[in-house]
């Protein structure tokens, strides 16, 4: 385990297409990120994670890779990335690349060779069958099997233009190691292992065989082989690059599965990102908060006591945190409180670009801006059946993965300070929440995040123990380290709340008044109190 740096890591996720566009083609690029490194450093993050920037057919925004060792011209050149790595390190920051190891693009030369000639050495890089063997459904809709021009069927878990690599083939495992080595030698500090939980597949004769296609996670997620492949991959690289950090994307992992990837041997991932933090209960309801808190307790106990859970509210596959869990009326307050609640627990914060200014979900202006074909279909049918277009789009905007991928709001200008106003992802962005204005306002979300991240870096919040405190009106927990104790108290409601139970020094607050011994919480207020020894 890379105790060296990952326990201090505060990760900032950048969706490169949406961050800043220096060459004015409507798509963000590496130079756009370089231009903002000082601002990110000032905010207090110390590690950047970029969604994939490699040559891609852009069917799935870079997750369908054609060449892992070439930078997609949309984002820049190899010289740009080398400069980028240097500039990140010059600021004492770290860099994590997204590593897509489960599949390639169908345009990747390996796949092209494999379908041109079934005798090609690349044929065994993928899964081929003579006929469609079962009724397994792919995550992006339809069967996991589609036919190539030569009549064979190939396996794909995501889009049909993204064939899955066959990890049983040792040459595939060696190729992926070589690619990782290439980037580690260039100086990157960590890898986010995309969808790694799917590397092992069951026999195609298992699971549902006939009828309508159905998601069969038990046939292609968390199979025992995943551990074999993952351990070989991570351990080989660790021997050569001891400081390389591995954070695995384990979307459907419960805490027990997560433990199996991180412990007990510590030979696989250093940390994982699970999507299971957020319960199905109605967001904002008491039941939601209770279930969510129980889940966090469990992760804190099972992972946090021995390692590093990831702490995050949103990413490029989910809606934005303030739109999903916060309050429209108390936008800034809820953004600040949600951040406090999550990031002061034990673990590695992962911020999504834009949350530091309270960016909300992207608003759709047309059906095409829905990424998912089935949502496009749903919208078309509902509108044709007489539902109001605006209403349908507003509802589906909460479901589409594009919701969180809006253009970064740098300033109150036509182009948002992005660099060009022909945004790759449609129009109607919100200008009033922007970095420039918030950097000048003392009480802004941006400044609050700056204080919060500074606090997070102190030993109490990186190393201290975690214990939840049970108060019906507040989301509360305490952290303790070497005789120091702090309480994190958050009002996750739109009601005023009071308590006289705590005494001590305020480390961070927003929306709090004190009358005598009573703390008065405005809607969505929060406070971090350090217990004073003489009290
Ligand atoms: O997402 C993968 C992902 O969420 C699945 O692994 C998940 O297990 C599945 O949907 C069932 O729950 C990653 C990226 O984050 C995403 O943007 C890509 O589209 C996807 O991989 C394919 O590369």
Image: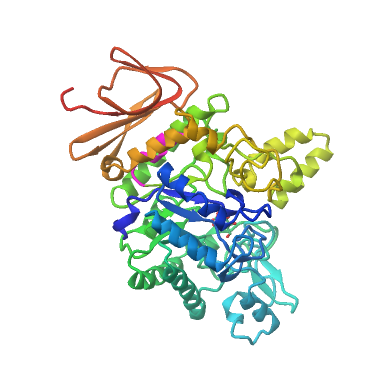
Query: From this viewpoint, which residue is outermost toward the top?
Result: 516
Q: On the rendered image, what quadrant is the C terminus found in?
A: top left
The span picked out in magenta is 338-347
Query: From this viewpoint, which residue is outermost toward the left?
Result: 534
Whether residue 486 is in magenta: the answer is no
356 vs 1: above or below? above
Q: How far across and down, in percent of the image, does residue 336 sit?
A: 45, 32
Q: Which residue is at the front of the view, 300 or 153?
A: 300
Q: How far across and down, in percent of the image, does residue 128 sit?
A: 64, 76
Q: On the rendered image, what quadrant is the N terminus found in?
A: bottom left
Q: How far across and down, in percent of the image, does residue 529 sit?
A: 30, 28
97 vs 286: above or below? below
Res. 293 in view: no
Q: Quadrant of residue 498?
A: top left
Q: How far across and down, in percent of the image, does residue 249 sit?
A: 48, 56
Q: In which quarter of the image is residue 61?
A: bottom right
Residue positioned 52% across, 51% down in the render: 35
Residue positioned 78% across, 36% down in the render: 389
Q: Give the tally of numbered discs.
A: 0
74 vs 535: above or below? below
Ligand 1 is found in the corner quadrant, namely bottom right
Q: Which residue is at the front of the view, 520 or 182?
A: 182
Res. 303 in view: yes
Residue positioned 67% across, 59% down in the render: 213
Q: Which colour scheme is used?
A: rainbow
Q: Which residue is at the front of the view, 299 or 332?
A: 332
Q: Is the magenta stretch mostly helix, strand or loop?
A: helix
Q: Which residue is at the front of the view, 77 or 224?
A: 77
């Amino acid at each position: 385990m890379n105790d060296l740096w990952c326990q201090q890591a505060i990760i900032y996720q950048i969706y490169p297409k949406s961050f800043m566009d220096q060459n004015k083609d409507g798509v963000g690029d590496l130079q756009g990120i370089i231009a903002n490194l000082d601002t990110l450093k000032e905010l207090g993050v110390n590690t950047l994670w970029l969604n994939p920037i490699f040559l891609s057919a852009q069917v799935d925004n870079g997750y369908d890779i054609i060449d892992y060792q070439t930078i997609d011209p949309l984002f820049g050149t190899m010289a740009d990335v080398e400069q980028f790595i240097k500039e990140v390190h010059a600021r004492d920051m770290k860099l994590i690349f997204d590593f897509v190891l489960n599949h390639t693009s169908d345009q990747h030369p390996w796949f092209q060779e494999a379908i041109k000639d079934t005798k090609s050495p690349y044929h065994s890089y993928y899964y081929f069958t003579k006929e469609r063997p079962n009724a397994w459904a792919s995550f992006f809709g339809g069967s996991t099997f589609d036919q190539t021009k030569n009549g064979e069927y190939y396996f794909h878990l995501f889009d049909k233009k993204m064939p899955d690599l066959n990890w049983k083939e040792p040459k595939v495992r060696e190729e992926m190691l070589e690619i990782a080595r290439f980037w580690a030698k260039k100086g990157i500090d960590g890898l986010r292992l995309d969808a790694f939980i799917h590397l092992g597949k069951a026999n195609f004769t298992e699971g549902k065989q006939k009828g309508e296609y159905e998601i069969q996670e038990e046939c292609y997620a968390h199979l025992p082989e995943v551990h074999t492949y993952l351990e070989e991959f991570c351990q080989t690289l660790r021997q050569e690059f001891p400081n390389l950090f591995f954070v695995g994307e384990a979307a459907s992992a419960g805490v027990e599965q997560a433990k199996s990837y991180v412990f007990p041997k510590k030979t696989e991932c250093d940390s994982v990102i699970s999507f299971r933090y957020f319960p199905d209960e109605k967001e904002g309801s008491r039941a939601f908060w209770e279930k969510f808190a129980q889940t966090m307790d469990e992760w804190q106990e099972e992972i946090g006591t021995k390692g590093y859970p990831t702490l995050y509210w949103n990413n490029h596959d989910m809606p934005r945190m303030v739109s999903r869990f916060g309050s429209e009326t108390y936008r800034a307050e809820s953004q600040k409180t949600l951040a406090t609640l999550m990031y002061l627990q034990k673990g590695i914060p992962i911020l999504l670009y834009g949350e530091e200014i309270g960016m909300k979900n992207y608003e759709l202006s047309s059906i095409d801006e829905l990424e998912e074909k089935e949502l496009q279909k749903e919208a078309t049918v509902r509108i044709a059946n007489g539902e109001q277009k605006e209403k349908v789009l507003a509802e589906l905007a909460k479901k589409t993965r594009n919701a969180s991928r809006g253009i970064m709001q740098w300033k109150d200008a036509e182009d948002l300070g992005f660099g060009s106003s022909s945004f790759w992802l449609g129009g109607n962005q919100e200008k009033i929440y922007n970095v420039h204005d918030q950097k000048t306002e003392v009480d802004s979300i941006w400044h609050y995040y700056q204080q919060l991240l500074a606090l997070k870096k102190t030993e109490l919040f990186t190393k201290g123990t975690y214990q939840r405190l049970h108060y019906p009106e507040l989301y509360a927990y305490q952290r303790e380290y070497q005789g120091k104790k702090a309480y994190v108290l958050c009002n996750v409601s739109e009601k005023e709340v009071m308590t006289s139970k705590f005494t001590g020094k305020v480390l961070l607050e927003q929306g709090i008044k004190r009358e005598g011994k009573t703390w008065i919480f405005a809607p969505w207020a929060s406070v971090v109190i350090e217990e004073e020894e003489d009290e």
